[in-house]
Amino acid sequence: MDLHLAMFVTDHAARINFGFRAVLLSTIAAKKVIAEFYGSEAEYAYIQGRSDGGRSVLVETLRFPDDYDGVVADAPALDWVASIVP
């Protein structure tokens, strides 16, 4: 097994960040930047992703359904366990 992959598999925080936390924190930060720049919150929010981005869209939508008004999860890569565990 690749050293970096072995470190990822054994690092609980890295798996949480990859699994859902990175997209959640990016969503929060983007909404703050938009509100600051335009002087008000966005009326609507949309997210789109393909492959791992599609997986991220699905996870974000399932965990935090109120974050976005519309989503496109194109060809989501869902079986990560099979792809990282030899």
Image (cartoon, rainbow, N blue to C red):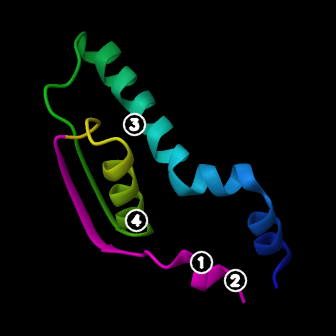
Q: Which residue is mark 2?
A: 85
Distance from disc 3 to disc 1, alpha carbons, whole Å, reads: 25 Å
First in sequence: mark 1 vs mark 4: 4
Distance from disc 2 to disc 3, alpha carbons, whole Å, reads: 29 Å
**Taking 83 as reference, is 78 above or below it?**
above
Q: Which residues are magenta?
A: 69-86
Distance from disc 2 to disc 4, alpha carbons, whole Å, reads: 18 Å
Q: Residue drawn 58% across and 56% down?
A: 18
**Taking 19 as reference, is 69 above or below it?**
above
Name the residue at the front extreme.
Answer: 63
Q: Secondary structure at mark 3?
A: helix
Is label 2 or label 3 in front? Answer: 2
Q: Secondary structure at mark 1?
A: helix
Other-residue count near label 1 (Cα within 10 Å), few / some / many at <14 / 14–19 / ≥20: few
Q: Which residue is mark 3?
A: 27
Quarter-of-image position of residue 12: bottom right
**Taking 36 as reference, is 75 above or below it?**
below
Q: Secondary structure at mark 4?
A: helix
Amino acid tagged 3: Thr
Question: Where does residue 3 sit, x and y in percent of width and height?
Answer: 86, 75
First in sequence: mark 2 vs mark 3: 3
Quarter-of-image position of residue 10: bottom right
Q: In this image, 5 relative to 50: left or right? A: right
Q: Which residue is mark 4?
A: 55
Q: Residue drawn 22% across and 12% down?
A: 40
Q: In this image, 81 relative to 60: left or right? A: right
